[in-house]
Amino acid sequence: MKIALLFFLLLSAGFVTAAEEPSIPALRAIEQFGSITISDGSSFFTFARDGSFHSGPLGESGREFAGHWKADGLKFTVTATLGWLNGASKLDDYRRIVFVIYDVRKKPSDPKPWRAPLPNLVDAYFLIDELVEIPKPAGAN
């Protein structure tokens, strides 16, 4: 009986260890996966390899951003338009958002019935260091 219990515990520990992905820098994760999506529990933020950025609510309505990002170390600076999902939006409402994103760890998708699964969802400790309104950037459509 003790041997069976020990075998079960070792087998279970092996599954837990095998299921945990290693932490890697956010920029390397974007290169490796094509994009990463982080979440604060109410919104999601997706950074794609091509430099595009998209954010939206996890619920049925709320704030969304669309734009581009550039990185310098852990700091990701986003220039984006602000809009509202299922709500009125004004034109040319631009924002600069500065994220500080520490190492990330890939996690399984957590689909919700009211939305599509988030692509390349990662666990990450991050900080929104700045969120300010800015004039329309030169060359913006």
Image: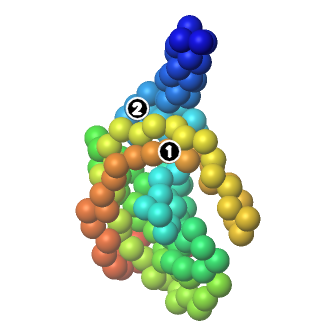
Q: For the view shown, which residue lies furthest in the top direction? A: 3
Q: Is residue 70 above or below residue 104?
A: below
Q: Position of residue 77 (x, y in %)?
A: 35, 57
Q: Residue at x 53, y 20 (%)?
A: 9
Q: Which element is circle 2 on?
A: loop
Residue visible at 47% across and 58% down in the picture: 39
Residue drawn at point x = 59 percent, y = 12 percent: 1
Where disc 1 sits, the SS reads strand
Q: CA distance from mark 2 to mark 1?
A: 10 Å
Is 129 on the left-hand or right-hand side of 24? left
Residue at the disc numbered 1: 122
Q: Residue at x 31, y 62 (%)?
A: 128
Instruction: Tell me which amino acid carries mark 2.
Output: Ser
Q: Position of residue 111 (x, y in %)?
A: 68, 55
Coordinates of residue 3 in the picture (x, y in percent):
56, 8
10 Å crowding of disc 1: few (<14), some (14-19), many (20+):
many
Q: Which mark is residue 23?
A: 2
User: For the residue marked with disc 1, what is the amino acid?
Assistant: Val
Image quadrant assignment for residue 69? bottom left
How packed mark 2 is, by other alpha carbons closer than 10 Å (few <14, some 14-19, many 20 or more), is: some
Q: Nearer the viewer, residue 17 or 100?
A: 17
- Where is residue 110 shown, x and y percent of the image? 63, 52
List the single residue furthest toward the front: 1
Compared to residue 78, the image places residue 105 above or below, namely above
In the displayed structure, 60 sits above or below 4; it is: below
Q: Which of the 4 image quarters holds residue 102? A: top left
- For the image, the number of numbered tags is 2
Q: Earlier in the sequence, mark 2 or mark 1?
A: 2
